[in-house]
Image: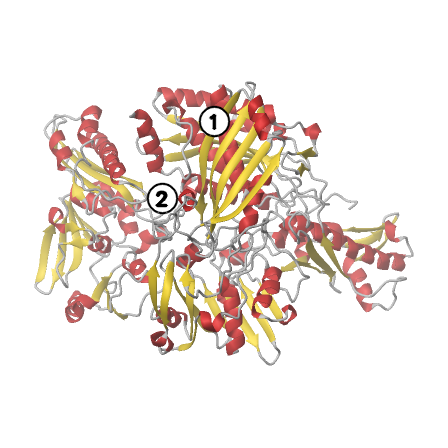
Amino acid sequence: MAQAPKFIGAPIKRRDDPRLIQGLAHYVDDFNPPGTLHMALARSPYGKANIRSVDVSKAAVAEGVVAVYTYEETKGIGPVPVGGLVPDAKVPVQPILADKQVLFAGEPVVAVIAETRYGASDAAALVEIDYEPLDAVVDLEAALEPGSPKVHDDYESNEAFVWGIAGGDVEAGLKEADVIVKEKMTNARVAPLALEPRGVLAHYLPGEDKMTLWTSTQVPHKVRTLVAGQIGMPENRMRVIAPEVGGGFGSKLNIYREEALAAFVTRELGVPIKWVESRSENFLTTIHGRGQVGEIEMGLKNDGTITAFRYNVLADCGAYYQLLTVAIFTLTGLMLPGPYKIANIEMNATGVFTNKVATDAYRGAGRPEATYILERMMDIAAVELGMDPVEIRRKNFPDKSEFPFSTSAGLSYDSGDYHLALDRALEAADYPAMRAEQEEARKDGRYLGIGFSTYVEICGMGPSAALGGQGWESARVRVEPTGKATVFSGASPHGQGQQTSFAQIVADGLGIDANDVTVVHGDTDVVPYGVGTFGSRGTVVGGSAVVYARDKVRAKMAKFAAMEFEADANDIEFEDGRVFVRSAPEKSAGFADVAMMAYSAIALPEDTEPGLEETHFFEPSNFTFPFGTHIVLTEVDPETGDVEILRYVAVDDVGNMINPLLVHGQIHGGIAQGTGQALEEEMLYGEGGQPLNASFMHYALPKANRLPRFELLHTTTPTDVNPLGAKGVGEAGTIGSTPAVVNAVIDALSPFGITHIDMPLRPERVWRAIAEKRA
Amino acid sequence: MIPASFDYVRPQSLEDALAQLGEHGDDARVLAGGHSLLPVMKARLADPGVLVDIAGIDGLSGISESEDGITIGAMTTHAEIEASASVQGRCRSLAEAAAAIGDVQVRNRGTLGGSLAHADPAADYPAVILAANAEITVAGADGERVIAADDFFTGTYETALGAGEIITSVRIRASAARGSSAYLKAAQQASGFAVCGVAARIALDADGAVERIRVGVTGVAESAYRATSVEDALTGAAPSAESIRKAAATAGEGVDALDDFYAGADFRRHLAGVYAARAIGKAWIRAAGE
């Protein structure tokens, strides 16, 4: 682009918002083809049980019931797809409906198809399943003890996999250390809880031998390839549509039983089949995130230099894997050194089967866990060494001149200036004043705490080879005969706002208004084969594909303009809806006029086809590594254990920002979600494997009234991994916030001698920690 | 999340409503604002055959003020109570409790009578009803009767309401000349229900000594209760921050407290003491200043 960007970098409001706010958007449940039947599932109430018998006779004759399916009728459907495995992992086969045993509460056993959703639900309640409840596996550590009940009877133990990553020599690093600090920490299992639960509508047309599957997903093409495979249908006979998707946070980066089941049933019955998840089902059967318990050992010199970092961790897999269950834990290993120069690192992970729904990708997906334990240990070490938490962090940062920076986990961080982000945050927070305020408050018996998190994360996923395949993204850009532009993206945004930001990217390159650009995604019959939206890749990888596709179209338009003006194509400029010769600006035509030339094709430039439509598949050369500093000021009420966040200052460096408003939106949501993990969220299970808090009456999400106004700032360190210089922002907030909030609470409680409390820091836990120290 | 099927009737008069309840007996439930009953039905923890919706009955809603107190219709919403100048002036703790219930949607639909009849052990109102010594008027097949607050809450989801009776109104005497009240709670972060809620109502004599004090505690035990040990310790003397703290510390003592993943019994008993001290202190400062 010759001219300065007009739209890229501008805080343009999301064009999705008016329809979302007014209830005019269309989610899966808003589509109701005539004749739609509804599916309800009879699910296990037990963590583990033998199924002695299944009697569907009452359900089958209930009013409005059309069909009932059990394991027998559905065993031909392929099992739930899993990927991202590590060598020698045990891989249990997850059936579509349970046969002889159920292995987690919520596992479906019988599917009932009826004329109404209520009727299906009533009939599912009439299914009589004779269960023999068995001992369930709930606790990770107990699961590995000899004599523990087993999740899978066929396996020798509950050990799912053993995986490790090492760089340098941790033992040597520990020997070299002046001080060794140790702690055991938990990243509790949490529920992603997208506002829109999952849902699927499958409609098979026997005459056309064609199926349309509407599903609330982040990865429509993966769903098509894999579900078509499960039901034995050629994937080019299946069209998957991800309509408006009300949030995913990783939980919809997956292939679930209900998708294959609905696809199977519609092919059997030839009528549309709909299933929309209830919130109760969402808690029970949509993947959970996190779920790690581990012991950390960290060696340091007296000056704060880290010499070694080791994490021995148990990873909660659940009963079966979903798509990326195992891979998520490996991301924790890659992220282990964080933003520090740690020459010697080691993670030894043991995957553990439990009688629970699978864990998988949840916003941050493995990186928040690493950042949490690392940032907590930095504070614990600072206390041990009598250093300020800022100084110990600075001591271990690589300098900006050291980038690209190679880590002991084997990654190459693209670019960074960690000192600058920290400086900016300290300045914005007025750190010395904050400490003074804390001192004053303590004199009044008030407990204020300051928490830091300096993080780096792995974004823009990612090079295909590094991901075990499919790290690219596709885009097609078409300039219509009337001069409007349409973007067809293989990415599948579900709230991120790329309908706006991709329009900004195309508008600038073609010199047209962003309002003249429409962005289409989430329909496998319409967009090129794509990978999807997750891992902070939508803009970084998907947006880069848009850049290249746009530039190809632009080059072709330039040829038509050059022919018209008898000029050199390299001398053609695009600006403000005009196409003109740079060296002779009076030679000018409207953008739409040039577009029409390409479609009328009365005259064609040499070696040029009619039409203006170009596709690009972008393969990134590396991940991107956004970073930042979050500073939190909390007050803890020692009598009640209540935590209040007084201030939240965040400096995030996400590279170039296409739309700062969208960036802020992502940071806001991410901070809220990460704060939820820090203070409130945790899936709890009783001894029998039944969830204790699987409802919004019991499971707390962070609410706006518990959060302060966020003070958001940025530094901008572009990346050279992609043409946008953007690093991605989808997960930064969740990664940065959780440890910052916990560190602030622990800092507040330091007068009591408290150095660690496991998340979530619910009032009772905080109160108990104080009470123990007082006793 | 889908309730079992049920019938629905919407009588236009109290007599009709009582007749419907008489006709259907145990199979019927009164539907007021629906914010306690419907969630239970959606979870299929209750499946009444008939819902008798009393929203169409005139005269069950609204707040009227007299010389010595206020009368609040059973169908008055939490939002109306929260916003009422009469309630704020005559029984501030009730307005505070109403404002602390659920969220805006719940407060716009949920009603005083519905909440009292449901008698959730973690509901906010019972603490205030006890502290304010409210009178609950109920109508039944045999006519009207008045139930004293101390007699009303009999257990978890249990009240002194007889079969087929409907709460029609709640009467609360105005605070004394040198009197006031306060309600404070620790809310369960998910549901917003009280893990511990304490209402204190205090009347001071001319010398500033405590003439009367009543303290209601909700969320801690299977049913809301009065912390009589606290009341006795503070009655008759001029309070101080220290005397309040010391007396309030007994608010949870010996209570058979609720115990769940969110808050253990000992934590709830501890909170009762903390919140009693804070609520009494607030009511005292208001009483002394007003």
Viewer-proximal residue among A175 and B171: A175
Q: Is mark 1 on a helix, strand or loop?
A: helix
Quadrant assignment for the C terminus of chain A:
top left
Question: For the residues marked 2 and 1, what is the alpha-carbon distance in whole angstroms?
Answer: 28 Å
Residue B216 in the image: state x and y as whole percent.
18, 41
State which quadrant residue B159 falls in.
bottom left
State which quadrant residue A488 falls in.
bottom right
Quick check: marks 2 and 1 in contact, CB under 8 Å? no
Say which mark, if any, is on residue A380. 1
- The amino acid at mark 2 is Gln
Residue B232 in view here: yes
Tally of numbered tags: 2
- The amino acid at mark 1 is Ile
Q: Which residue is drawn at 22% across and 68% down?
A: B12
Mark 1, Cα crowd under 10 Å, few <14 / some 14-19 / many 20+, is: many
Q: Which residue lies furthest to the left in this view?
A: B142
Q: Which residue is drawn at 50% across and 60% down?
A: A94
Residue A360 in the image: state x and y as whole percent.
52, 50
Say which mark, if any, is on residue B189. 2
Q: What element carries label 2?
A: loop
Mark 2, Cα crowd under 10 Å, few <14 / some 14-19 / many 20+, is: many
Residue B279 horizontal side relative to residue A475, left or right: left
Residue A450 in the image: state x and y as whole percent.
46, 28
